[in-house]
Amino acid sequence: MSSRTVLGRAFSVALGAALLAAPAAAQRDNSFEISGFGGGYFGSTIYQSVTYGTVGLNSSGMWGARLGYNFTRGFGVEFSWSGSNPSMQFNYPTNPRPSGSLGVNNYDFDAMFNFGQQKIWGYFALGLGWSDFSPSVTGTGGQPIATSGQSYFSGNTAIGMKAFINPHLAVQLDARYRWSQTNHSTGGSTVCYPYYPCYYYNSTYYGAGELTAGLTYVAFK
């Protein structure tokens, strides 16, 4: 099952559960939130070369923390950090192939759009930030290969829900898709139009899905 399929199903479940709640119910205005979470990271192709093949990132665990503030019942902001260390998949024409992993650290600033009742919050998030990539690669002979890390501009969108156990503590479910501008080829596709010829284009964006669960503590002003 692809990362987009997993995220699509998660989005549907979260949105459906949140919409069951009446939107006019009270939200927690002027409140701070702090969250810890863990879950799954679903990578994709991060590098493509006509000569050498492609490098993809496998699925792995992830972890992180969020700090947020709700200005009104419907709007808030959030800063988050998340980390993962997926293994690399080298699809090269030669064999044996290199091996390695990629340390990923994401830093996001999100606008949060909340809806729902007092005990069930739904939210939609849209944000910008950056992603730090730190590779660790071993060559075909078992020797380490010198690499350097890179930081890239990124964006993300998410949908999720918070189910409150008591006024201050909630269980949070979050489904998120993230994309980063890498400045190198990550894939491509062919587009055809009924009245125009087909053409091929390269993509320089890397996309990854995230599905997490955690605990959120709410403090009122």
Image (tube, helix red, strand yellow):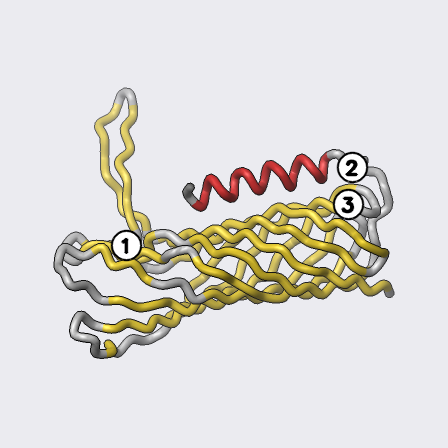
Q: Residues within 10 Å of mark 3 (few under 14, many from 20)?
A: many
Q: Quadrant of residue 180 in the image?
A: bottom left
Instruction: Identify the residue position indicated by label 3 in the image.
Output: 120
For the C terminus, which image quadrant?
bottom right
Give the label on residue 21, or none. Answer: 2
The residue positioned 81% from the left and 35% from the top of the image is: 22
> Whole-percent x and y of residue 162?
72, 50
Q: Quadrant of the N terminus?
A: top left
The amino acid type of the residue labelled 2 equals: Ala
User: As shown in the figure, which amino acid type bears the numbered disc 1?
Assistant: Ser
Q: Nearer the viewer, residue 123 or 170?
A: 170
Element class at badge 3: strand
Q: Is residue 100 left or right of residue 36?
A: left
Asked whether the residues under the numbered discs 2 and 1 touch, taking CB atoms below 8 Å apart as contact, a structural biologist would say no
Query: In terms of secondary structure, where does tag 1 sit?
Result: loop
Residue 78 or residue 173, whichever sits in front: 173
- Outermost residue on the top side: it is 194
